[in-house]
Image (spheres, helix red, strand yellow):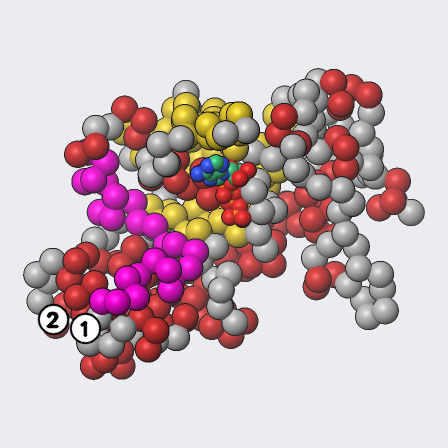
Amino acid sequence: MTTEPLLSVRDLDVLFDTARGRVPAVRGVSFELAAGEVFGLVGESGSGKSTVLSAIMRLLPGVAVANASQMNFQGSDLMSMSAGQLRGIRGTGIGLIPQRPMTSLSPVTPLRKQLRWFLGDMPQSEIVDLLDQVGLRAVAERLDGYPFEFSGGQLQRLLIMLAALARRPSLLLADEPTTTLDATVQAQVLRLILDLRDRLGLGVVFVSHDLGVIAQVCDRVGVMYAGRLVEAAPIGELFDNPRHPYTQALLRALPSRYKRGERIKVIEGTAAGANRLPGCAFAPRCPRAEAMCREQEPETRSVGGALVRCHFPEDAAGANKPKEAAA
Ligand SMILES: Nc1ncnc2c1ncn2[C@@H]1O[C@H](COP(=O)(O)OP(=O)(O)OP(=O)(O)O)[C@@H](O)[C@H]1O
């Protein structure tokens, strides 16, 4: 028996029309998400992670052109939905946790009023119950305050409550929800998201540039580079057997893998302009690139438990290991 995925994205392309021409921000991205699963999207700044989330929410700006052969949520095609249908899905079907809690709320309006915008005439006792569920019971007494009177962690919990609990969505999109928080509060917020996933069976797409954070919350992860999904694998598989040279470089650069006194490893070069190259976007920075990599775009192939977009992915036996890593 096959069960339909909660979310299915196939061949998603997003272009931005800018004064300097068309920017291909997302290129041929495909992935599926099951109910109760957390799928991470990781990659450096500008790799297209947030654009994927905006495309799923159908909240891209007017300068964007999006195409996909499929973008189904609970079996319905998001791409062909009317504005009215999309309004019905946002919040109630799909919730979004934004990156910066401070700038996602109005700074000049008391929280109580902002909660009413979203929750309508929900009885106060239900609002207190929702606040309680995200560890904010004490805040219920202070709702006449303005956002600046609350900590970043409190505001992020509040936004998680609105996104994940208030209207009972089945899909949660989390856009770097802990980036602006200190380590202790970050851990609390991550635990809260996992707790809600466990209790409510939410599917979560979790965007982060931090593989350490991804490792703590995700079941599967997709690595993005210059708009492409270059590797997708279960989290353990990705950490134990990274196949794409970019994934391998990301893992080698993880702060937790440094030994004291060791030279900090960086990925030489930059991704700027890589999305316009004829061959593999990572070729100019890749330790095992060959002529073919600079000329032909690789297709996505299945290697072990992973999907990898590389002409020479490393196999389980370590063949194709980059020279610097093998040394
Ligand atoms: N409104 C826009 N107009 C033009 N280009 C845009 C727009 N929004 C995003 N882009 C471009 O699309 C690409 C992908 O951006 P996106 O914000 O999705 O990346 P990201 O991986 O989420 O980065 P970050 O981690 O910094 O948020 C970048 O090259 C960015 O400059």
Choose between 263 and 147: the one closer to the eye: 147
What's drawn in magenta, residue-wise?
Answer: 85-109
Query: For the image shown, how many numbered marks are present on the structure?
Result: 2
Q: Position of residue 146 (x, y in %)?
A: 27, 73
Q: What amino acid type should be assigned to the residue bearing mark 2? A: Gln
Q: Where is residue 114 in the image (x, y as percent from the top left)?
A: 21, 63
Q: What amino acid type should be assigned to the residue bearing mark 1? A: Val
Q: In this view, does 162 lie to the left or right of 225?
A: left
Q: In which quarter of the image is residue 285?
A: top right
Q: Who's the residue at 53% across and 25% down the image?
A: 21
Q: Who's the residue at 29% across and 45% down the image?
A: 94
Q: Is residue 315 one of those drawn in magenta?
A: no
Residue matched to label 1:
128
Relative to 51, residue 280 above or below: above
Residue matched to label 2:
124
Q: Does the residue labelled 2 lie within 8 Å of ligand 1?
A: no
Relative to 205, residue 27 above or below: above
Q: In this view, does 134 lie to the left or right of 52?
A: left
Residue at the front extreme?
19
